[in-house]
Image (cartoon, helix red, strand yellow):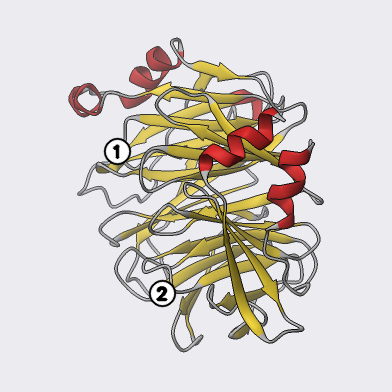
Amino acid sequence: DLYSRVVTRHLIMEPRTSPAITSCIYNQEGSRIITGSYDGRIRIWDPLSPLEPIQILVGHDGPIWTLCSHPTKAEFLSGSCDRAIMRWDMNSGNLLTVTYVETSGLTSCLDVDTKGERIAACDSKGGIFVGRYEETHYKSLARINHWSWKKLFQIQFYPLDNSVMLISGEGGLLNLVNLNDDQDYQGYQYNSHGAKVSEGSVLKCRFTPSGSHIVACTADSSIIVVDINPRELKQTAKVSHYLIQACKKSRKLKTHTARVVGLGVSPRNDQFATSGFDLKLRFWDLKTLKEEFNIHLNEKSSALCYDHTGQVLAYGACDGIVRFLSTHYYIFILGLRKLNYNLLYTTLPYSLLRELRNY
């Protein structure tokens, strides 16, 4: 329709970076964006001049499946199917440390707690690994066995309590893991069936910044939103039991027509975005859970990330291109390489876009 044509026309079109982009993150200041691709290379970009990458980092022997930035340092982590977790300096691009995880699977997700003290990783063989961020070799990483989960897809520390982690995996399962601050993780075992929220695997899941919701995307084209009461969660001895009860009241959004593979949550705590194999990128109001608007994508995209202001969403697609889209004021950005202009800003009022959608 006319609305979709206007929106997609004002997306950034950048040179092809590589084979498909698998992950992307912003640094804490929003001055850099880091992308990982199937070719095993990491690229660092300047969002204000995104025609060519500032740096291309080489180290992994396989596709980059996950990236994670440090909350206070100019560093980030990368994970791949080569079992290596690499720590990089964001300014110089130097490789700081390499840690190999004892698994036959690929590192599917990484996260660092809000204090920057602890790292967690999960793999495609059902294992979770926890350790101290500053340890050179992460020898204290331990495997947490989920015997009923063959694959794990996502892991994240709870933003209000770094002793609680959210994980997702096959069979439509979500779970919370409670770790003590003085736990050394050696030989730590955690077996649980988790809370079943969908018939399809939970491919992506995230806490909202306020810790009041869990948003999850599934392979059966559903979006699951679970309400969390931070006070009740903190007072609960077994957080996994709390999640099972909370998931009974979860809300399901069924708008995508194919599996939902991309998820981004705004740091403003007012919006989240999802993308699916139906080639739709949808923006949702977190309070009302109503769809604000959507655009049609030319390629599948599973890598979504908001900048630190929550006003710009970057997404990488299977065509190897990174695109940027304004999420609140609808400032659409077009790269004009031939005219030697880095960016051209075109502002479309929200009221006008509403009229275009209804047209």
- Residue shown at the point (66%, 55%) measured from the top left: 106
Left-right relation of 111 to 12:
left
Q: Is residue 184 above or below residue 43?
A: above
Mark 2, residue position: 75
Q: What secondary structure is marked by label 2?
A: strand
Spot occupied by residue 40 in the image (x, y as percentages of width and height): 71, 72
Task: Name the side, left or right, on which 205 lies relative to 103.
Answer: left
Element type at mark 1: loop
Q: Nearer the viewer, residue 155 or 356?
A: 356
Please give the name of the residue rendered at 63% of the width and 33% of the height, measured from the top-left corner.
Answer: 355
Q: Which residue is mark 1?
A: 210
Relative to 59, residue 247 above or below = above
Residue at the spot 33% in from the left edge and 24% down from the top edge: 228
Which sits in the foreground, 290 or 139? 290
Depicted 84 relative to depicted 128: above or below: below
Nearer to us of marks 2 and 1 is: 1
Q: Is residue 322 above or below residue 166?
A: below
Quadrant of the rendered image containing residue 339 = bottom right
Q: As shown in the figure, which amino acid type bears the numbered disc 1?
A: Ser
